[in-house]
Image: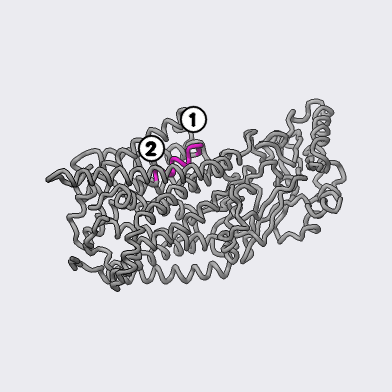
Amino acid sequence: MTTMTRKKTVPNLFWIVAGIVGGLGLAVALWRLAQGLGATTNLSDAYPWGFWIVFDIFLIPFSAGAFTMAAIANIMNKDEYHAIARPVILAGFVGYASVVAILLLDLARWHQFYKILWPPYWNIHSFMLEVTLCITLYTVILLLELSPLIWERFRMSGAQRFIRAIGAGIAATGIVLSCLHQTSLGSLFLMMRENLHALWWSPLLPLFFLISSVFSGLAMIIFVTVITARAYGYPERVKLLRPLAKALAVLLIIYLVLRLGDIVVRGNALLAFQSGAMSLLFWVEIIVGVVVPILLFAAKKTRESGAGLLWGAVCVIAGLALNRGSVGLFALERPAGAQYFPSLIEFMTAFGVLAIAAVVYVLVTQYLPVNEKVAYEPS
Amino acid sequence: MAQYSILADVGKCVGCHACTAACKVKNGTPDAVFWTKVDTYEQGTFPNAKPYTAPLNRCMHCEYPACVSACPVGALSKAPEGPVTYDANKCVGCRYCMAACPFHVPKLNWDAVLPSIQKCQMCADRLAADLEPACTSVCPTGALTFGERSSLLTEAQGRIQAANGQYVNHIYGENEVGGTSLLYVSPVPFEQLGLPTVGTEPVTKLSEQAAVLGTPAIAAVAAVVLGGLYYFTKRRDQALARSPGAEKGEQ
């Protein structure tokens, strides 16, 4: 039934690097909570949001691989994808857990964070509220989707059967929550009509954020699957990625048409060439993150090679990072003369959280049946 | 209920800083934090540069405030009389209000371990006691005038006319982002004062419509699409499974 095919293990160097980066990150995170934002970050009145927010609005669509995977495997009933679902959902979970950690560190008045979870305080007009609630709930959903790892490992068949029975329901709830918070992340910036550069601000921002989360999620599935296939030795899994790459190309084309069409329709086409550094930023994002991967994934030759898939996915992820960086930081109007570069502590906490996430990912993969071929019986 | 406003007349400001001091005394704001502050600007180029002063960098008290709409926990609220007020006991410090404000008004006292949002409250507590805000009560020249919004609009129009073309023919705040409770008249173009050119539609409109109508719509559409896909693919797979020798559905 289960085949123990752990062909390779993680090198010691990983543990040393991740341990140091994670440990230091944890230490400076506590320092930040004790000292306040002003003493530890380079944020200011002109830059109330900085690196951490960009980190969050990037990592959330990056981790969307988990919900895209759930949609493919559980809703579209493509059972063959259950083989690669678990590493992807695990990656999604550590991604969301990282987002929650960084969000908490980013709260100036973190001692009152619980008020955002407490209904009497809720302002239903606020997309910050919707994003926070959806992310919190969705992290719990991901935990439930991963719980069979525990039930299988410790042979708790009752719990196993129960989770399997409600599996499609959990997946569906997770997908609805994901659609909500991925669009809400874009809606956060709807109010910044006057501040956000017209190459990025659009009434369609929620739609752009949703579509880009789905294609970034597919890119993340490709990325995680190719990497784990190489690291742990499952070359056969890469074949499963070809239809996903095809779907990714289609989504990228739709996104490209919508983005450019929206700019033209709103009469901002000239801005794409006359805005100096902003124009450059825009075209790098569009070419690296959208056009190049369309070409890579549309060509059969690159789509069917592991390296081609990996490069395409890396381009999409880089384009996503540029897009979210622009919307959350670079393309927002500032008072004259204001400057911002993240402090060492901002970098250290973010990379520390990622290192801890990587350690958790590897530990769970090694000690729980993440990569084992589970006999999945479609109900 | 009367709706109050403050009229700021840049042409009447003599730069005495009485409003700055009165505000600090009344509100006890932290070091280096000002809820209202008189700034000095230069108009023209040397040697013909003319200095002028203006009580700027203060909350506009929007009719449709972005900060209030943005705040996830209701720490900011708009009173019907005009003031947009802040309650630090509710605030989690997400700073969405700072990012959302079209005038870059809300500030944070960054030096504090647990900072709070810093912005003018239009002395809402004084208003409740039938007193005018501290800053307007001490202004010696009428550069800051407190009153009902409708009468201040008439007053502002009168001052523009009395200036014989010396003033910009526009009341800043009358219609900006849906109207504000702070109104500016000025001999200097507003952009030079750091007051941005903004549209007249409230910035909150699209966002609030999306929140109230879009959210349930997305949830409903997502649920229906998911349910449809689930039953469609399930039935297709079952049909394929029944036909002899059939392979699983490939894309």
**Residue most toward the left?**
B245
Label 2 near label 1: C-beta < 8 Å? no
The quadrant where residue A352 appears: bottom left
CA–CA distance in space, label 1 to label 2: 17 Å
| Chain identifier of the residue bearing label 1 in the image | A
Callout 1 amino acid: Asn
Up-down: is A28 above or below A288?
Answer: below
Dot 1: element: loop
- Which residue carries the number 1 mark? A268
A79 or A220, which lies in front?
A: A79
Seen at 49% across and 69% down, the residue is A28
Residue A198 seen from this side: yes
**Residues packed near mark 2 inside 10 Å, few (<14), some (14 to 19) or many (20 plus):** some
Chain to which mark 2 belongs: A
Residue A38 visible at all: no
From the viewer's perspective, is A291 left or right of B242?
right
Q: Nearer the viewer, residue B54 or A128?
A: A128
Locate the C terminus of chain A by quadrant: bottom left
Tell me which segment is drawn in magenta.
Answer: A201-212
Q: Residue at x 21, y 52 (%)?
A: A238
Q: Residue furthest bottom?
A: A154
Nearest the viewer among A329 and B92 is: B92
Residue position marked by numbered label 2 in the rendering: A255
